[in-house]
Image: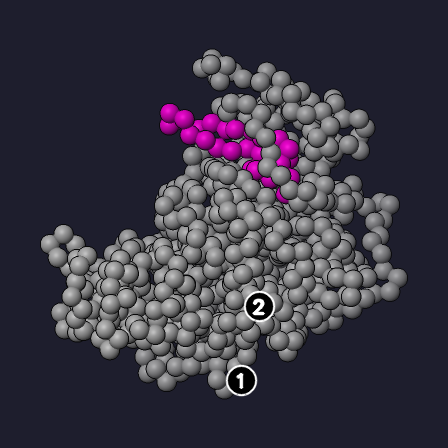
Amino acid sequence: MYQYTSFDKLFVKQRAAQFRDQLERNLAGTLSDDDFRPLRLQNGWYVQRHAPMLRVAVPYGELSSKQLRTLGRIAREFDRGYGHFTTRQNLQYNWIPLTKSADVMEALAAVDMHGIQTSGNCIRNITSDCFAGVAADEIVDPRPYCEILRQWSTLNPEFAFLPRKFKIAVTGAVEDRAAIAWHDIGLQLLKNEAGEIGFKVLVGGGMGRTPVIGTVIRDFLPWQQILVFIEAVVRVYNRYGRRDNMYKARIKILVKAEGQRFIDDVNQEFKNILERDVDGTEQIIPQAEFDRVAACFKLPEGVAPIAGSKLHVPADAPASFKRWTERNVHAHQIAGYRAVTLSLKRTGQAPGDATDSQMELAADLADQFSSGELRVSHDQNLVLPWVKESDLFALWEAARAASFATPNIGLLTDMIACPGGDFCGLANARSIPIAADLTARFDDIDELYDIGDIDLHISGCINSCGHHHSGHIGILGVDKDGKEWYQVSLGGLDGSAISGNASTPGKVIGPSFAAEEVADVIEAVLDTYREQRTAAGERFIDTVKRIGLDPFKTAANAQRRTTAQNA
Amino acid sequence: MKFIDTSRDRWHTITGEDGPMVTLTPTAYSLLTLIQWNGVRNSWPADMPVGVIFPNDADIEDLVGDLPRLSVVALHFPKWIDGRAYSQARLLRSRFRFAGEVRATGEVLVDMMPLLKRTGFDAAVMRHDQSLDAAERALRFFPGHYQADVNEHRPLFARPPEEAYSNVEDFNQAGSAI
């Protein structure tokens, strides 16, 4: 993991001091609520339905056990005993009073954490592959680059008040597990024929009202130039992005509207920075700096290839352990090691939620089995990246006791869901009860296995925090006449291997459904798949691609009760 | 950062009853709108100090030819959360080497100070309700930054460790005590 220098530590501490100054002026009445709002947002403080929400940054999803323990303690001492891991690898609290916010920022700073730029119209926390540095299919470890980008984007004075939020995702593996095409900037690390490292750069992806897949703006940018190139992109966006309509303010709209002219502008700006600016070439990343940062990401102490090790499942092992090894245990780049997902998708808890004691247990498991390190996944689970194959059975038993061992990773109940209308002030409808209905209905593990690999994503509103556009099945909450309705879409792809390494928004299968119809609709859609699939091996998404939406529409429409009466 | 009290400032706008006047007689220390400047730029006496108020939705590149004649460029924040003028200021300094005053006008708030300073503003007309003390304090929280800016051309990674902090003295006196 990246080790904070004394500079980094002081910086975060001073950010907490700056925030306390702003909060105190707000409480004293000299900083109005309206003027305080953008400031608190850039420290992660939203005002939600019940209380302020705090979003804590987990840079590119890497967490130490010590940090996770502190997050658990904050949940217990300042919140109501739980937190929510998000699709952007962050952690959200829902019940902390704003008057306590400065105290919480100080508690976070003590373990090198903060809420810097987790909200507001600025460059947000940079996300990455949750298996970065351990994935068997990795070409280049993205973490040092993520950290250099984190530092560049942190309190960048020119880009603190962009037209709208700005999200960057980085991957360095064959499979895109970071949904890079769905980001304002998506970066794919690769090697050219000479073995040199560079980035494929995508720009202008995004969800929301207008889902757009990013456009490739560079096929291969030498890594040393990445800060300059991103500065060019963000500067063009800051100058020319729309500010008259917040729904048209994301960079994707500018890229769509301007097309090649946008690309030309960025390339010209890139050239201008390097050739004309007094400090342009200073931002080319020196090898020494890369080496300094990369040194933080060397193998944890004691981790080394283990010859002759392999994943051994004893014949008399419980079926649930076998299933767990199939679903929750992932290939690793170091012989004898595996990455293990701790599932945060289980009956009785909202997807991505963890209680204070669960966070502490996960921290204990990380200490015992994973060199004290964890990851937050884009799918809202926790990952232990450094588990010895010989420890898997012991880990499974411990994880099971902590309710982390549901063997459902990549299956229907491993769904993505935003907090929705139960918490979020923006939501049109609730997500959590829909997720709970589906988790309850599909609680039979054999049935889940039979349905197989599938991405189900739920968003409580068009802001798309639950990534419904990229779900093989997407569910979107909408508000009509003060009631909750749900639009169902099929065929969305997030760029991962089971999505065929492609990205595309799903298509809506008809008018929205009533809340009580949703679980029936999903079941009917899945039954249609099971009837229509060519063989047990054909995945849901492949059947959808092959036979089209009509059979699914027919099956879904047959479930209309409330909506049929209203029609 | 120079905090400007407009009642004492020698720079003045030229405004009639119906807004900025179109026809005007050159006077020293005039701060002209871009439209006014475009009307008089060819006849403005070479030795008469003049400044231009530049809108945040125009291309700052268009002003480059005039920069040697301008003592002040006033950049505008119609709303304080509209960050376009930060890019304009940065380009004025880093690309076009403008050495005159870059002044922040419009809705200018205390908490913008660190951003203004780092992107090249050296003067600010704050909104009437803002506190000078709070603005000066806002400039002292961070003894150093990661990126290069117009005052420090080297990012943190290009500076020797002993130069990581640029205003550490200020910081020791004020920031850490808060």
Q: Position of residue A200 (x, y in %)?
A: 66, 56
Q: Is residue A268 magenta?
A: no
Secondary structure type for disc 2: helix
Crowdedness near tag 2: few (<14), some (14–19) or many (≥20) residues, C-alpha within 10 Å: some
> Circle 1 is placed at which residue position?
B160
Residue B152 appears in the figure: yes
The front one of A105 and A512 is A512
Which quadrant, please, contains the N terminus of chain A? bottom right
**Region rendered in magenta:** A468-494
State the separation of the CA atoms marked 1 and 2: 17 Å
Residue A148, labelled with which disc? 2
Q: Are marks 1 and 2 in contact (CB under 8 Å)?
A: no
The residue under the point 44% across, 43% down is A248
The amino acid pointed to by label 2 is Ile
The front one of A190 and A484 is A190
**Does B178 sit left or right of A112 as displayed?**
left
The amino acid pointed to by label 1 is Pro
Q: Quadrant of residue A539?
A: top right
Question: Residues at marks 1 and 2, common chain?
Answer: no
Q: Position of residue A38 (x, y in %)?
A: 35, 56
Q: Is residue A482 magenta?
A: yes
